[in-house]
Amino acid sequence: MPVSMSVEQMVEEKARQAKAVAPIVANMPTDIKNRALINIAEAIVDRREYILSRNSEDIEQARKNKLSEALIDRLLLNEARIEAMSESLRQVAALPDPVGEIIEGWKRPNGLVIQKVRVPLGVIGIIYEARPNVTVDSAALCLKAGNCVVLKGGSEALQSNIALTNVIKQAISEAGIPQEAVQLLDTPERAAAQHLMRLNQYIDVLIPRGGAGLIRYVMENATVPVIETGVGNCHVYVDASADLNMAEEIVFNAKCQRPSVCNAAETLLVHKEIASEFLPRVAKRLIEAGVEIRGCQETLRILPQDKKVIPATDEDWDTEYLDLILAVKVVSSLDEAIEHINRHGTKHTEAIVTRDLKSAQRFCAEVDAAAVFVNASTRFTDGFEFGLGAEIGISTQKLHARGPMGLRELTTYKYVIYGDGQVRK
Amino acid sequence: MPVSMSVEQMVEEKARQAKAVAPIVANMPTDIKNRALINIAEAIVDRREYILSRNSEDIEQARKNKLSEALIDRLLLNEARIEAMSESLRQVAALPDPVGEIIEGWKRPNGLVIQKVRVPLGVIGIIYEARPNVTVDSAALCLKAGNCVVLKGGSEALQSNIALTNVIKQAISEAGIPQEAVQLLDTPERAAAQHLMRLNQYIDVLIPRGGAGLIRYVMENATVPVIETGVGNCHVYVDASADLNMAEEIVFNAKCQRPSVCNAAETLLVHKEIASEFLPRVAKRLIEAGVEIRGCQETLRILPQDKKVIPATDEDWDTEYLDLILAVKVVSSLDEAIEHINRHGTKHTEAIVTRDLKSAQRFCAEVDAAAVFVNASTRFTDGFEFGLGAEIGISTQKLHARGPMGLRELTTYKYVIYGDGQVRK
């Protein structure tokens, strides 16, 4: 690109290039797409010294900028992480190609034959944060589903992302996919993301991958259609009829197995009839694991307040802690539980523990979320756990896709209609 | 509502009320929803004097404001139009209920049973223009698919819309559906639409129904997910191998059968090999029907320039005339036709007339549009013509739904998962 280009011009030019090759990539045979993914898998291992050296520049800069150790850990690449990316690429290559499926078809009385055919979305914009593996992962999933991709990663990971994208472009081009299919906005400037979000002419869909702040920012500023992902204020409701042993295992797993992810539980709702039996035993186990409990008034009547049991504020019911903290509320009925969840939930994942069929059915029917579980941990909302084979994110909106999004969710459809001269009367 | 409420408070309060009853409406039995639609069908006929008298206030105001006769005609209700609305309600009542379909389901190795169940979207915001029948039509389609609806019609139709909504609310309430399920923002102020577009807390999806200006305005200002509808810069491409009789019928039908709608053709592309034979005959027929031709240089070499044949400007290739005007371009290849369409089309409907299998296949695969036709008129992109039984609009975006949207496209899905104590390892 000419040096004199503005950020906006650079973004527009790269998006235009992606759009120009989109019809070619959309119609690429499966074996070429798979070959391209295997090429990337091999190339990132072969060229790991180049990638790691550019990554170490990012790390050095991050230390200079006094970024947190947690953030630096997310930025860091090493041999093991490169191997993991490579393995993940091979797994995507092994998945079935969603493109070309004839979803349904029928013949009209006038003889028109209508087919609804699965096709790629076109050009997908991905806006993400510090983790460089998202670069490889997003490119792989988009390409396998026949899409081009324009990537805008976090400024902290810029050198790593440039190196990875260079390797990806060469690897796909050797397989016969135009290297323009993968574009990186190689600038730390936020203006690049802002411009990308409004390029409806070239970008078909935007997927933000990151924290709540990033996602809100994209939702508020984009004119390109967005798939909202990831924020999970998930609840476990323990019904009056619950098997309390099962409930204890599920609550413990949902909160503690990996507290930093979106499908971890943030609030426990307990029916009043079993609260005084259930709360002390589950609290003991949670507190031993380091969990802080933020309880409603009734909870605090049952669990003595101390260092690890403190009163909840109104804000707690709306907070995704992503940490070893659990809000706890005693409810007087299933109705109150459903109402609380529909008011405070983020339409991600909700679970009930119950032995009562009617409670299970009503919970599933009336709770508004991408995934509702009966007698299982919220942690199962995940593309791999669902058997989708891969995941680009978990949608919490209702348009297009809900819950874990795999390859099929990176496609749309097109009506293909064959006639023999039909005109409308 | 208290008189002292601001427009924003009124919008928020009505949206909140709709959201509050959304779980009830979502789980409403089919027979109650159908009863509600039949009740509306009967009530708008029974109370036609009330509706017509309020409509005549709008018409009077429109004449005072010197609105065009075309707009006044769109505003106008009469006995025949009320009968047509009533009949359309009965048709929606007779359609199958999309809600509750188990789209797919499977069992995971760990015993979790996953079902993907079709559920309503929730609360749909509809922003539209002058035609009061959109009020009835939108409410009926949304309700049948288990959704609540917040309506914001054009200020010119305010009194008509208030009357219709009053009738609807009473009719559904008598069937057992909460009257809060249908909300009208009964103000002429634009601020109401602006506020509605950003109420992500209460509104799940926005569907603008109207002209290009309205749709662009909503796309640019909404934070609620939008389904873009309706703008159609549709092309007919006549291939070198086309049956020219068939091509003539299709071009004539696509342009002239109803020029004011989005699936009418706006540009004709003709392969150079048959241009000098085809253009004079099709032009003769079009011009006899009152069509103005705006041709490329090569077209004007073949068709003598006159009152009805004038040179096209660059702007013509991007214009949806919705009128008896046709842009005409001679292209040197199928590739040029596809490239022109992908550059200037609006992803609505595109057609090829050909006898060549490879041309047909390439056109269908490479043209990026909701509907691609081989040897048929573009005018068939329509919910009724596709056999969907109804239509709330034609989506020209790629997220969620593409092409004609019927009842099924007013739903989403939810994962319902039953376990027996599974936790994640």
Image (tube, coloured by chain):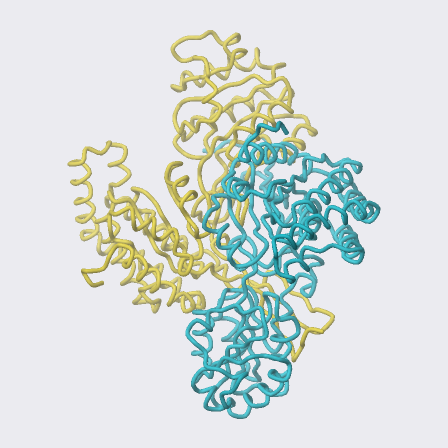
Chain colours: A yellow, B cyan
Q: Tell me if I can see residue B100 in this picture.
A: no
Q: Tell me if I can see residue B192 in this picture.
A: yes
- Outermost residue, front side: B64
The N terminus of chain A sits in image quarter: bottom left
- State left or right for residue B35 relative to residue A224: right
Residue A101 x %, y %: 55, 62
Q: Height in image: B257 above or below B102?
A: below
The C terminus of chain A sits in image quarter: bottom right
Q: Residue at x 51, y 57 (%)?
A: B213
Q: Nearer the viewer, residue A67 or B323?
A: B323
Q: Residue at x 46, y 43 (%)?
A: A228
Residue A180 x %, y %: 32, 64
- State left or right for residue A40 relative to residue A67: right
Residue B341 x %, y %: 47, 72
Total numbered badges shown on the rendered structure: 0
- State left or right for residue A400 relative to residue A419: left
Residue A326 found in image quarter: top left
Q: Nearer the viewer, residue B281 or B20?
A: B281
Residue A310 x %, y %: 43, 12
Q: Nearer the viewer, residue A137 or B351?
A: B351
Residue B247 found in image quarter: bottom right
Q: Height in image: B26 above or below B75?
A: above
Q: Height in image: B249 above or below A124?
A: below
- State left or right for residue A14 relative to residue B152: left
Q: Residue at x 17, y 48 (%)?
A: A53
